[in-house]
Image (cartoon, rainbow, N blue to C red):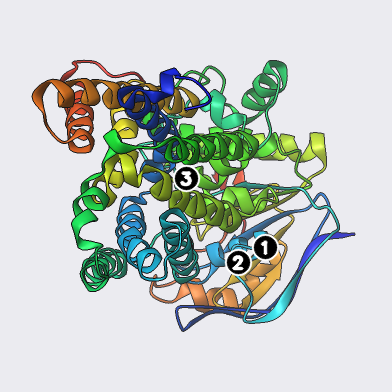
Amino acid sequence: MSVIATEGLAVRLGGVQVLHDVTLSIEAGEIVTVVGPNGSGKSTLLRALIGAVAPSRGSVLRGPGLRIGYVPQRLALDPTMPMTVRRLLDLPRRVGRAEAEAAMARAGAVGLGARQVADLSGGQRQRVLLARALLDRPQLLLLDEPTQGLDQRGQAGFYRGIEAIREETGCAVVMVSHELHVVMSATDRVICLNGHVCCEGTPEVVQAAPAWRELFGTGTGGALALYRHDHDHGHDHAG
Amino acid sequence: MTTGTTMLDDFLVRAALAGVGAAVAAGLLGCFVVWRRMAYFGDATSHAALLGVALALAFDMSVTAGILGVTGTLAIVLWAATARDVAQDALLGVLAHGALAAGLVAVALVPGAGGRLDAYLFGDVLTVTRSGLAVIWIGASTVAGVLAWRWQRMLVATVDADLALAAGGDPRREQLILTLMLAGVVTMAIQVTGALLITALLVIPAATARRLSRGPEVMAVWAVAIGAGSALGGLWIAVLADTPVGPTMICVAAGAFAVSRLAPTRAG
């Protein structure tokens, strides 16, 4: 059963057509990675899914009472607002100590509770935001470039965490990736976005698709190809 | 007087209570003004109060109603004109100073209003009446009550509007409520600091509190304490030195801010 879907979705931002004819459906428990070049509308797609930008055409169909856990690319938090990690976890719903610590453990943010959010490193902040999103008990987890600023080891650890969360909670995961050629190995489906859905399917299907090669192959002289992120070896050539 | 004399008959006691009441409301709301970078928003709203004064005098209405009407209307217009939180700086600058100029012209056109202009620009807390005091404390209680009721929702919307949306909140609604409360604080505080310095009463105590706080609740409490302390200290100095009360209160608050910046360590 699909937890969220779009039908013919189009979004205009400041007169510019960012997305058009996006029809997709996310199934329960599925891990979907959205890849695409800069300006391809990846973040806008996530923001349309949470209702932060209104479609100019088409629609977003959310299951009734759908609980979304959203991990933004950056937190808008102004530095004039003092905020400890622990206090952030209490937003929007106050949670007990045990619940907060369990979420931090799951997200790999143990021991950060007393720190100021503004003082965290990029990777720490992503983990804290993930912990906060988990406290919303999401049926759908939306992650906007969550591994930005992490090295490969950090990325692999983060991806393992996401995989474990999916196993434990059964939530669907939609992740936007700035990496064009490395996707998490547990990805069930890759959606290749460039204003519209160029191609989609399992990582193997997508890497063979002409649209993908056209999008990412040109300009790199064919140097880039789709890799799957493998836990044992860092990464492996999939082709 | 049939009710006998009470403490409130003393104009200094009334002035102190008015100053503290304004500082409570401004300190709490001022945190959101600082966090959301709404200082210009506050300027535009408070400068528009002069226009409300002129309209009230011209049509023989209550000045409080006139100010609340004009600032409330402007608040809604500003809210509608600003998509999300980031208002266009230039637009707000035009509105803030355009409203001030229009208010000055309007006051000059209303017969008899010009003589009271200083009181509306710079405040006149020493002449606050019992009903003026009631307006201030009803306003302060309302602001405190609404913030307590919606505190979590307003915090999330302020931390990150998208986070609030994803969790089923409505950050635009929280922004509208905050903006309307700003109009209310302008209305109640104009007699204490005057239209020109209301933004200072909002921003300075909150900015001073930032250095002393590790969390938003602590910052709000400190902002109220610093605001109230500045109001009382300013009143005391103004009486001793025969200076205008509102500006003296703001000077004390600015002094506290300077001291907080000089402090070697900061919380956090």
Dot 2 crowding, Cα within 10 Å, few <14, some 14–19, many 20+: many
The residue drawn where x is 67% and y is 27% is A103
Residue A116 x %, y %: 42, 26
Does the residue at mark 3 contact the one at mark 2 (Cβ under 8 Å)?
A: no
Q: Is the residue marked by circle 3 packed among few (<14), some (14-19), or many (20+) residues within 10 Å?
A: some
Q: Nearer the viewer, residue A41 or A224?
A: A41
What label does residue A49 carry, if any?
Answer: 1
Q: Is residue A67 left or right of residue B229?
A: right
For disc 1, the chain is A
Q: Residues within 10 Å of mark 1 (few under 14, many from 20)?
A: many
At 79% from the left edge and 45% from the top edge, which residue is drawn? A171
Comparing B214 with B44, the one in front is B44
Q: Is residue A32 visible?
A: yes
Q: Which residue is mark 3?
A: A75
Q: Which residue was labeled with disc 2?
A: A45
Q: Is residue A203 above or below residue B80?
A: above
Disc 3 chain ID: A
For the residues marked 1 and 3, what is the alpha-carbon distance in whole angstroms? 18 Å
Which residue is depicted at the point 43% across and 40% down? B132
Whether discs 1 and 3 lie on one chain: the answer is yes
Gap between marks 3 and 2 measured at Cα = 18 Å
Secondary element type, mark 1: helix
Residue B173 in the image: above or below residue B19: below
Q: Amino acid at mark 3?
A: Leu
Of the residues shown, which amino acid type is indicated by label 2?
A: Leu
The residue sitting at the right extreme is A1
